[in-house]
Image (cartoon, rainbow, N blue to C red):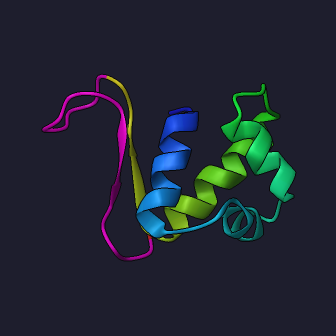
Amino acid sequence: MELTVAQCRAARALLGWTAAEVATAAGIGIMTVKRFEGGQIMNPVSVAKIKTALTDVGISFIARGEMSSGGGEGVRFDGSPAD
């Protein structure tokens, strides 16, 4: 599943993280996070690093069309890091 800009922003909000904190966790530059959240086309490796960093701290991503009680794409935070 591809990470969307909206999911990235929502995940940051759930965690209370700044773009700088995401960048640090992902091992990328803050401008890379800002460019992604600004809707620019990104290197898939950078997007994967962002997604992995967020998943590692407990964020789950819901793809459009996946089963969820609310319907559309989104994020879920279970409060514990992924194994």
Q: Quadrant of residue 59?
A: bottom left
Asked whether the viewer can see residue 24, the reply is yes
Q: In this view, does 68 lie to the left or right of 4?
A: left
Residue 14 as seen in the image, left or right of residue 49: left
Residue 72 within the segment the image draws in magenta: yes
Quadrant for the C terminus in the image? bottom left
Q: What residue is shown at x 55% (from left), y 46% (from top)? A: 8
Q: Which residue is drawn at 82% across and 57% down?
A: 30
Q: Does the magenta stretch include residue 25?
A: no
Q: Which residue is at a point 53% across and 68% down the rendered structure image?
A: 56
Residue 71 position by quadrant:
top left
> Relative to 38, does residue 59 appear above or below in the rendering?
below
Viewer-side residue, 82 vs 31: 31
Q: Residue 38 at x, y = what percent?
A: 71, 34
Image: 24 above or below 76:
below
The dominant secondary structure in magenta is loop
Please name the residue shown 55% across and 60% down the image.
Answer: 54
Q: How many marks?
A: 0
Indicate whether 65 appears above or below 3.
above
**Magenta stretch in the rendered image:** 65-81
Q: Which residue lies furthest to the left in this view?
A: 69
Location of residue 69 in the rendering, given as x and y in whole percent from the top left corner: 13, 38
